[in-house]
Every structure is written in structure tokens, then in C-alpha cells.
Image: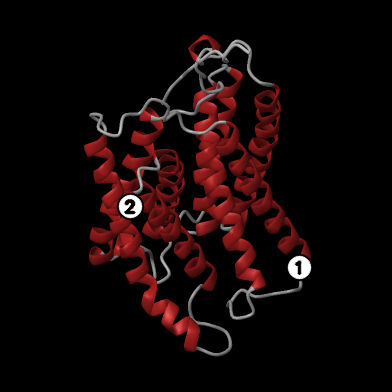
Amino acid sequence: MNGHVNTRPAKDLLWLRRLFVVFAVLTTGSAVRSYWVTRGNVDHVDLLYNATLLPLVWGACVVAWRGRWSAFVLLAVVHKSISAFGAFVYFLEMALPSSMFHSRNHPEYLAWNFASFALSAAILTYLYRKYPPDVQGFAPRGSLVPALRMLQGGFLLVAIAITLDIAPTVGRHLTQEGTHDHTCAWVYAELMTAAFLAYAGIAGLRNDWRAFVSMGLIGPTLAAFTNFTHLKSGYEDAYGTAYAPISLSRNLPIFAFALFSVVYLALRFPPRLTAPSTPPAAAAPSPAAG
């Protein structure tokens, strides 16, 4: 991960640094509450979710206060990807009438999760527009292309694997009436993960490397997170895939590949913190004399 130090950071980065301190405090409080409610049950998805976000948000705060803005943007992207995913899942679990957790008794929970999802998605979009991955000068026939092609193929394969894995559940979702016997929110969320991975793979086929790296950070981040949570808190396997050898042999390679992809792309294509260079004015042809 690039530890670029910028002595004069943009004002928006300073505001984001302050905002992430607030996020860190809120996440810490949420983690303590989850630990108390679940009585320290490390297999519970609520505790796993907060345990994943906690080091990311505090890590973003630390590198930001040390002035390592590239690392801050990357950690912020990973944190907000998982935060948006989790808030989306929690919102759908209560909002979908077919969900086994559907309830309108606590509209404040619905509002809070929707606001969390919207804020995380907005920050994620802003970071990618203001500080996109630095692919300027990347040669289509450069030495990195074989590795990127392997990642591209991997993204498409994982997207297909996720789709095939949840296809039977989607089929039951479309035919089953009333409250479903599966977690609908995770079905939609995993379909979203597959969509990000497929988008990254297609962007690679089109040599759109900026979109490839951007979606290649979000999609694998979500794939790694879902596989991590499913290790200890599975829905198809009663105690998680860690207790099911067949599912474990399938999920661990996906988790390892997703984690490697995020780290590799973050190191090779750090965020661009400055405006792209433009050709000097002297290189432009002079107007004809009148």
C-alpha cells in the first residue's frame, strides 16, 4: 500500500479525516453493544461485522493523522464498501416482507440502516470520482497485463460461482410464498457482489483499467467479507462453512483470491491524489497568422 505523504492535503481529506474519527467512535460503540448482546458469541454475524470494520476504521484514522493519504483513501474505500454492504443487508432484513426478520415495530432501525447505507455509498462514490486509481501511463502491453488478465478471469469465474451457488435459493425465493426459509437480504447482497465482480471482469475485457481497478477493489472486498462471515456464521450450514469440509474447500480459495486481489490492486494502482498531468501549452500548434 502506497504510504505517500502529502504535506498540503486537500481540504476535503481533512474533513474526511475528522468524519472517520466519528465513524471510529460509533463503530467502537456498536462493537461493544454487539459483544454485549451476543454475549461474546464469535459465530454471530453482528459481532463478525463489527470486528471486521473496527480495525479498518481505526487504521484509516491512524494513517490519516500521520499524513499518509493514499493509504487513508484505500482503507476508506475498503471500509465503506463493507459498511455499505452490511447496512444494506440489515435494512433489507427488516424491510422485505418475505424476510424472516421483517418487522415494522422499529422504524428507527430501518431509517438508521438506510441512512448508513446511503452515506457509505455517497462517500465511496465521492472517493472514486475525486481520487481514482492511478492508471495514467499504464501500457496495454506492459508487464502487468498477464497478471491483470488472470485477475480478470478470476473475477468472472468467482461471479459465475456465486451466481450458481445461490441460484437454487433464488429459485425458491421466486416460488415460495409468505415468509421465506432463507435470508433474502443475503441473497440480494451476494447478487450485488457477483455484479461488481462481473463488471470488473468485463471492464478488463474492454481494457477499461480505471473501472477494472475500481470495481476490482469493491467486488473482491465484498467477496472476502462474505466468505469470512460464512466461515463462522453460515446460513446453509448450521454452524458456518468452517464446520463443513466441502463448503470450506470451496470458500477458502475464493477468500484467499479475493484478499490477494484487493492487496495487489491497492499496491499496484494507488489513488491519484493530484490532477492528471496535461501536455504543455508550447506543444500545441500555434494559430495561423491572419
User: In the image, what residue occupies the spot 63% across and 46% down?
Assistant: 120
Give me the residue at 57% from left, 48% from top: 83
* In front of the other: 268 or 59: 268
Whether residue 175 sits left or right of residue 248 in the image: it is right
To which residue does mark 1 refer?
106
The type of colouring in the image is secondary structure
Identify the amino acid type marked 2: Phe
Residue, far front: 290
Badge 2 is on which residue?
155
Residue 239 in the figure: left or right of residue 23: left
Q: Residue at x 70, y 33 (%)?
A: 19
- Above or below 26: residue 160: below
Q: Earlier in the sequence, mark 2 or mark 1?
A: 1
Query: Residue 76: horizontal and vertical position, in percent?
Result: 56, 36
In the picture, the quarter occupied by the N terminus is top left
- Image position of 201 with respect to 56: above or below: below
Quadrant including the C terminus: top right
Q: Position of residue 115 (x, y in %)?
A: 72, 53
Mark 2, other Cα within 10 Å: few <14 / some 14–19 / many ≥20: many
In this rendering, the label closer to the viewer, 2 or 1: 2
Image quadrant in which you'd find residue 21 = top right
Q: x and y percent of residue 86 in the render? A: 56, 55
- Seen in the picture, residue 171 relative to 260 is either above or below; the reply is below
**Crowd class of label 1 (few under 14; some 14 to 19; many from 20; radius 10 Å):** few
* 232 shown above or below 220: below
Residue 137 placement (x, y as % from top left): 38, 25
| Number of marks in picture | 2
Q: What kind of element bears circle 1?
A: loop
Q: CA distance from mark 2 to mark 1?
A: 38 Å
Q: Secondary structure at mark 2?
A: helix
